[in-house]
Each structure stands twice: as C-alpha cells, then as structure tokens.
Image (tube, rainbow, N blue to C red):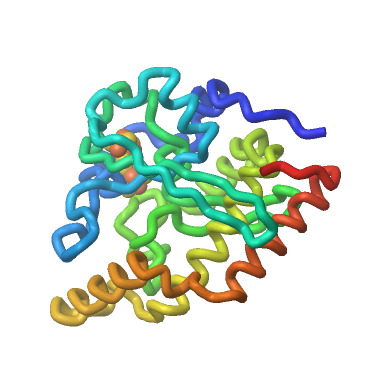
C-alpha cells in the first residue's frame, strides 16, 4: 500500500544543499537562457511543470505572488483510458520569486531529475531543464556551477532526499515518462548546442521550437505504446493497483 505524498513535507525539504550558488552563475537556472533566440515560444518566462496534486498544494498556500500569469493545464491521455495532467507556470521572477519557499519541486531539484525504474529506485540522473539536454560535455561545459563542480555530491544528496517522493507511483510514472520524452527529443535534435555558431544556433532553436509545438518526437504509436507499458510496469511494481 503506498502513502499519498505530503506536499507540505516535500516543500519543506532541502533537496540541493548549495546556499547562494546563484552568485556563481548569475542565476542561470531562473532565466530563459536561450529565450532571445525564440520566435514562437515564450522568450522570457521559464516554464515550470507541476504535477496536479502539487499544483493543488501550491495554490492552497497562495502560490508565488510575482507569478501572475495563470498556469496552463495540459492533460495527457493514455491509450488504456487513463489520463494525467500537469500544470505549467511561466516564471519571469529571475530568481526573486516571492515567497521563495513556495517555488515548485522542479526548481528545488534542479539541475537534475531522477531516472528511475518501475519501483522508484534511482538508476541515474538527467538534466531538469530542456535546453540543458544539448550540451556536448555537460560536466565541463554546463553553465550551472553545481553540474560542473559538484555533480557527484548533488546526485548523492538527491538520491537520499528524493526517496519519500518516489514512494508514489504517479511520481515514478511521470519521471519515467519524462525520461522517455527527453530521450526522443535528444534523438531528433541530434546536435550539441555549445558547438554551434550564431547562424546554426538560430536554426537549432527554430527546429527545437517546431519539435515542441508540433510534438513530432512523440506523435507516433510506439511512444503511446511505451507510455502504456510504463503505466503497466509501475502498476505491477506498486501492488498491481491503478494509480491514475
Ligand atoms: S543551481 Fe546551478 S544554475 Fe541554478 S543558481 Fe545554482 S549554480 Fe546557478
Ligand atoms: S520559481 Fe523561483 S526558483 Fe523557480 S525559476 Fe522562478 S525564480 Fe527561479
């Protein structure tokens, strides 16, 4: 039997212990770092995904006062009849969200999200921001100081601090789907952003925008089948109970 997530506890957990790391990078992760090249997607806002129950908790505590644009709800339908939703916040606060203690989970676990098996065991980590996926050698080229200088320590800490969250099958399911989603995007993009000159970077971003808006990396039967299979695997791992 799994325990529902206590989002209050999650929002009181320190996932990445790196006080004032923003002083070393100009607050890179709180900015839309390639936004100036975007033609269609939001140039300024950082897009922050929240799970449905997280969003309910976030709203119940009053949210972040200087994020004023209403969250966008996106619902995903599995071919087995199940569905789940995420809420997307667009943050323009540049690191000064108020109150900072109300920032979403994705901000707390940056620079990584966990790659997990169906039981919620952490196998590895992947970059938490979409544009971070495209560095050639992230450990040395990445703009986040923690990735360049403290990757092992941060991953070790996240492996411990994320455990309570990974007792929930919906969270495990979403992280597994996210890994599938980013793998397909990386395959389609098939380039390293830090190796491109200005003209090629513009083309790369235009392609990226088209991929995101068209959904091309994920619009095929094999992706839907994979998501259904992930659902079944996670269900089997969690007492064979439906969780969506
Ligand atoms: S997590 Fe990384 S990118 Fe974000 S403020 Fe800290 S060092 Fe900078
Ligand atoms: S909510 Fe706060 S921590 Fe998250 S991106 Fe916005 S300013 Fe940064």
In the rendered image of this protein, does residue 182 appear above or below residue 74? Answer: below
Does any portion of residue 21 appear in the rendered image? no
Does any portion of residue 209 appear in the rendered image? yes
**Residue farthest to the top, as pictured:** 61
Judge by depth and name the residue closer to the eye, 64 or 151.
Answer: 64
Which residue is depicted at the point 53% across and 53% down? Answer: 76
207 vs 38, left or right, is right
Q: Residue 99: image x %, image y %?
A: 31, 22
Q: Is residue 211 left or right of residue 114?
A: left
- Quarter the C terminus occupies: top right
**Quadrant in the rendering for residue 118:** bottom right
Q: Residue furthest front?
A: 81
Please report the residue visible at 68 percent of the width from the left and 29 percent of the height from the top: 4
Counting from the top left corner in percent of width and height, residue 209 is at 28, 68
Please determine whether, in this image, residue 63 is positioned above or below residue 159.
above
Q: Quadrant of residue 1?
A: top right
The residue at the point 16 percent across, 65 percent down is: 39
Q: Nearer the viewer, residue 149 or 157?
A: 157
How many numbered callouts?
0
Q: Measured from the top left, where is residue 147 in percent x and y?
A: 41, 54
Q: Residue furthest right?
A: 239
User: Is residue 151 shown left or right of residue 30?
Assistant: right
Horizontal and vertical percent for residue 163?
A: 66, 38
Residue depicted at x 29% and y 76%: 207
* Up/down of 176 relative to 5, above or below: below
Relative to the observer, which residue lies in front, 241 or 78? Answer: 78
Ligand 1 resides in the quarter of the picture at: top left
């Amino acid at each position: 039997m799994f325990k529902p997530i206590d989002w209050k506890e999650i929002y009181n957990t320190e996932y990445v212990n790196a006080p004032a790391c923003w002083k070393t990078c100009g607050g890179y992760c709180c900015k839309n770092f390639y936004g100036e090249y975007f033609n269609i997607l939001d140039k300024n806002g950082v897009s922050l995904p929240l799970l449905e129950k997280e969003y309910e908790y976030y709203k119940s505590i009053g949210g972040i006062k200087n994020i004023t644009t209403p969250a966008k709800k996106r619902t995903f339908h599995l071919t087995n009849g199940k569905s789940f939703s995420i809420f997307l916040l667009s943050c323009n606060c540049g690191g000064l969200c108020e109150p900072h203690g109300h920032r979403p989970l994705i901000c707390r676990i940056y620079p990584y999200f966990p790659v997990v098996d169906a039981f919620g065991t952490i196998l590895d980590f992947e970059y938490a921001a979409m544009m971070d996926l495209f560095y050639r050698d992230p450990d040395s080229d990445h703009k986040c100081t923690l990735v360049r200088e403290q990757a092992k320590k941060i991953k070790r800490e996240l492996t411990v601090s994320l455990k309570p969250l990974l007792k929930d099958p919906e969270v495990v399911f979403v992280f597994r789907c996210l890994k599938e989603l980013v793998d397909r995007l990386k395959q389609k993009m098939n380039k390293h952003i830090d190796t491109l000159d200005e003209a090629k970077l513009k083309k790369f971003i235009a392609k990226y925008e088209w991929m995101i808006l068209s959904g091309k990396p994920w619009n095929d039967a094999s992706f839907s089948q994979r998501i259904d299979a992930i659902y079944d695997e996670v269900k089997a791992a969690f007492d064979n109970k439906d969780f969506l």
